[in-house]
Amino acid sequence: MKKTPKALATAADLDARRASINTETKDKIFMCAGGGCIASGAMAVKTALLAELKKHKLDKTVSIVETGCMGPCSGGPILLMGRDNVYYQHVAVADAGEIVEKHLLKGEIIERLTWKEGPKQKSVPVQSDIPFFKRQTKIVLRNCGIVDPNSLDDAIGRNGYQALSKLLTSMTPDAVIEEVKKSGLRGRGGAGFPTHIKWAAARQSPGAVKYVLCNADEGDPGAFMDRSVLEGDPHSVIEGMLIGGFAIGSSQGYVYVRAEYPLAVERLQRAIEMAREAGLLGQNILGSGYAFDLEIRKGSGAFVCGEETALMASIEGRRGEPRPRPPFPAQKGLWMKPTVLNNVETFANIPFIILNGGDAFASYGTAKSKGTKVFALAGAVNISGLVEVPVGTPLNDVVFDIAGGIKDGKSFKAAQIGGPSGGCIPAEYLNVHLDYESLNELGAIMGSGGLIVIDEDACMVDVARFFVDFVREESCGKCVPCREGTRRMLEILTRICNGQGEMADLERLSTLGTSIKSTSLCGLGQTAANPVLSTLRHFMDEYKAHILDKKCPAGKCTKLVTYDIDAEACVGCTACARRCPVACIAGVAKGIHVIDQKVCTRCGTCYDVCKFKAVRRNGKSK
Amino acid sequence: MVKTEKKCTCGGVAASDAENHARLAQVIQEYQNKPGALIPVLQIAQALFGYLPKDVLRTISEGLNEPYSRVFGVVTFYSFFSQVPRGKYVIRVCMGTACYVRGGQAVLTALEQELKISVGQTTPDRVFSLDVGRCFGACGLAPAVMVNDDVHQFVQPGQIKDILAQYRKPTA
Ligand SMILES: Cc1cc2nc3c(=O)[nH]c(=O)nc-3n(C[C@H](O)[C@H](O)[C@H](O)COP(=O)(O)O)c2cc1C
Ligand code: FES
């Protein structure tokens, strides 16, 4: 048992503590314990590894470090061997014995579990040689996948709280804001508002009580960057908030985390407690006289609560309805006090900026957008997961060079960026630079960083309908354009998907969309039409195919799809009949099967399960 | 640990109603003077009772000195709060973008047909409730379905029967 280290009373104590931490990694196995890998069975792998270590009497020397997200979620469970940086993926419980016997004891690499690259599937064992990792630049994720989020020492060993210590001993609040200004950091929550302007405004607002809020609502479906940062490196966010509090003159912060993220809440809570015990939160931090504390507030399943004024209403215990601005939160925010609200990723950048200087941060990115951005890659890509690249990196590099291109040899149709507020980028703009301005020009937005890759199997009208349905459901109902407008847009889109659309509907969609955009109260409504307008702009032929030809080219819109069974290909395996949820397939074993079109709900199950390509969609087999 | 006989069979709720009410009273006491206490107290109450019945809402309204209408307004605003009892297993089909484009809708349709309930409903035997989720952060494993805390990944409509069977199995 380790004895509890004593509290850190001064900056010198923190230095001493850092110096005493052993950062040697050779006897460590790093295991990704991010949400994705846990879902893939990482914990069972850990148990098996521990048993094997014990069996070989290595349990005293070799330890397993549970880290946050390492990035390539689709490869989970993942291990990184500390002794030689070898990276193993898709590790199963049954592999544990071999990993200990071969890798740890004999130093042999287990090819079967290594990373495979390119069409030839060449094995690339060492993590730093793998293109997915090599091509990234990590500032926000600097500790994710390396530290144990439940260990304060791990954080301190990687310069955690060093920026705080620096500013408490040698900087004024104005100097901190100046450094953030120099960095050019813009908010990562979606709108890209310059962080230093918010901070300076809140600093100048009169009042003894001020608040720092961290937005961890991450409502954009398909985004999991903030979750991964909180789960993998909570101390960087705490430190960022401490710095924000110092800059604006606040002593209380809140982190608003969505209800769907229990693991993030658990790890952040533990990190807050550890920081408090060590004296890094609370009164007189590091002997400087600065006082700051943090509390977590959990959301309750309302997307609109990611909007700043709604979020504050929710913390106050009310319905999360936005209110008009001004007054801006920097003047009248939480409980009518001056408040700064920033996104998780924004805060995670702050310690780096203070420690290395704004210029170091500004050396990444483009003229107008500095630093890096974390993207959550998902959808039809080979490697889905977290990726951090300098702002302005071409979409093409992210999708093809880093994420390994499109799954199953299909073709790229679009990238959806920015979630329900964003838009779809078609293949002809694959070279677009991922920065705020270039994306806006194409009718998309940088957003929070969700990047969903869409292949030829998806119907773009259906994707637009999906987002409108999302915002319709999540609209808080306070203002008419958003509440009613999204409903009307959904009706029109549903009509088109059902084959009952008319050409005039396209005009209606674009007028309605434009007016919802310009008249809604908050960002939810103001951006609700973006997925529709951007698909109208880039995928007009798909809309026309639904309306004029009554066809869904992707075969997604069920009303425009039929399934039938090719009598020549059917071998009578009965798989489809057994799986059909409405039992509308007739046929006996080894006999030809037939779908009853009157009962068929077009769910596509038969098409999925048929191993003989006998089930046809719109007359075409798989 | 001593196990007591319990009459209540409402799926998985461990403590008796009286114990829960006693605990709720404590929680209200703890939170009474905290600003913005209503939502945290409702969250704890829902975890205790499994849902938020009227008497619980009334207790909270009185305990925190908030008008009942305001408590009710908050409960109906947030989708996480439920005023009806839920099944032993809450199935949540992810309808986040990644899951949607990877076939989440087909999974949901198959579940609705198989369970003969629609989203928001509970089977008459109170074994399953069906809900949609908006992204569990398992987007790399899409489409994802959560059954209570288990995440099932890369789910195909054809697997639904097998997945449900795992939970339907009578436990000895
Ligand atoms: C409907 C809506 C939802 C939002 N959801 C989020 C969210 O989940 N996370 C987030 O950081 N910002 C979200 N925002 C943006 C916030 O209002 C706010 O601009 C941001 O948190 C500020 O932080 P930043 O300056 O660091 O970006 C949302 C905005 C709107 C209009
Ligand atoms: S979209 Fe389904 S888990 Fe994220």
Image (tube, helix red, strand yellow):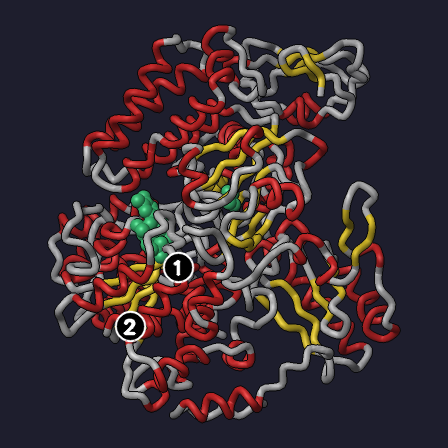
Relative to A580, residue A307 above or below: below
Image point (70%, 71%), residue name = A29
Relative to A190, residue A524 above or below: above
Residue A291, image x and y in percent?
28, 81
Badge 1 density bin: few <14, some 14–19, many ≥20, Cα 10 Å: many
Residue at the spot of label 1 = A185
Q: Nearer the viewer, residue A263 or B38?
A: A263
Can residue B169 be seen here? The reply is no
Give the amino acid at mark 1: Leu
Residue A152, image x and y in percent?
50, 79
In the picture, measured across the screen, residue A146 lies left or right of residue A354, that is right
Relative to A572, residue A251 above or below: below
In the picture, measured across the screen, residue A532 lies left or right of residue A410, that is left
Q: Secondary structure at mark 1?
A: loop
In the picture, measured across the screen, residue A339 lies left or right of residue A129, that is left
The chain to which mark 2 is attached is A
Image point (29%, 79%), residue name = A172
Give the amino acid at mark 2: Ala
Residue at the spot of label 2 = A247
